[in-house]
């Protein structure tokens, strides 16, 4: 499992305000108004709570791990590796796609 340097540099330190898990889609809203959407396949392990700060993103071909400041982790299997992670800023402009 390797560090996703590009996404980690962009997103590190953002504070979670809200999460929503619908079938195949994990959405995370941050205090700066940005949002992260992850298209998933199967169950997600771990829990994301408001107030946590995202520290880094680990990724291999199909697995994604979000690691938070309290050392908690959330793991997901990506639906379409290379096209399942979308980060948008508060103005809905694309910050990251991968």
Image (cartoon, rainbow, N blue to C red):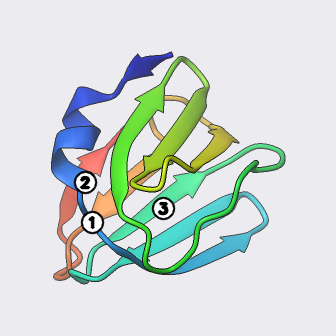
Could you say where residue 11 lies in the image, as x and y percent from the top left? 25, 54
Mark sitting earlier along the chain (1/3):
1
Q: Residue at the front extreme?
A: 70
Q: Position of 5 compared to 44: left or right?
A: left
Residue drawn at x 21%, y 80% as measured from the top left? 32
The Cα atoms of the two marked residues, 2 and 3, are separated by 13 Å
Mark sitting earlier along the chain (2/3):
2
Residue drawn at x 67%, y 42% as measured from the top left? 76
The Cα atoms of the two marked residues, 2 and 1, are separated by 6 Å
Q: Which mark, by number, is residue 37?
A: 3
User: Residues at badges 2 and 1 in contact (C-beta under 8 Å)?
Assistant: yes
Residue drawn at x 21%, y 60% as measured from the top left? 94
Could you say where residue 81 lies in the image, as x and y percent from the top left? 54, 29
Eyeballing the image, is 7 above or below 2?
Answer: below
Eyeballing the image, is 48 above or below 30?
Answer: above
Q: Which mark, by number, is residue 57?
A: none
For disc 1, the marked residue is 14
The Cα atoms of the two marked residues, 1 and 3, are separated by 14 Å
Residue drawn at x 73%, y 57% as measured from the top left? 24
Could you say where residue 22 lies in the image, as x and y percent from the top left? 73, 72
Report the number of numbered marks: 3
Q: Which mark, by number, is residue 11?
A: 2
Is the residue marked by circle 1 packed among few (<14), some (14-19), or many (20+) residues within 10 Å?
some
Based on the displayed image, in which of its 4 quarters is residue 2 positioned?
A: top left
Tell us which disc is closer to us: 2 or 3: 2
């Amino acid at each position: 499992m390797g560090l996703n340097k590009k996404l980690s540099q962009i997103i590190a330190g953002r504070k979670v305000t809200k999460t929503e898990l619908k079938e195949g889609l994990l959405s995370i809203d941050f205090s700066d108004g940005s949002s992260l959407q992850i298209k998933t396949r199967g169950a997600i392990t771990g829990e994301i709570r408001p107030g946590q700060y995202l520290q880094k993103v680990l990724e291999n071909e199909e697995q994604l791990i979000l690691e938070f400041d309290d050392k908690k982790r959330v793991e997901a299997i990506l639906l379409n590796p290379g096209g399942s992670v979308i980060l948008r800023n508060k103005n809905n402009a694309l910050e990251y796609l991968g």
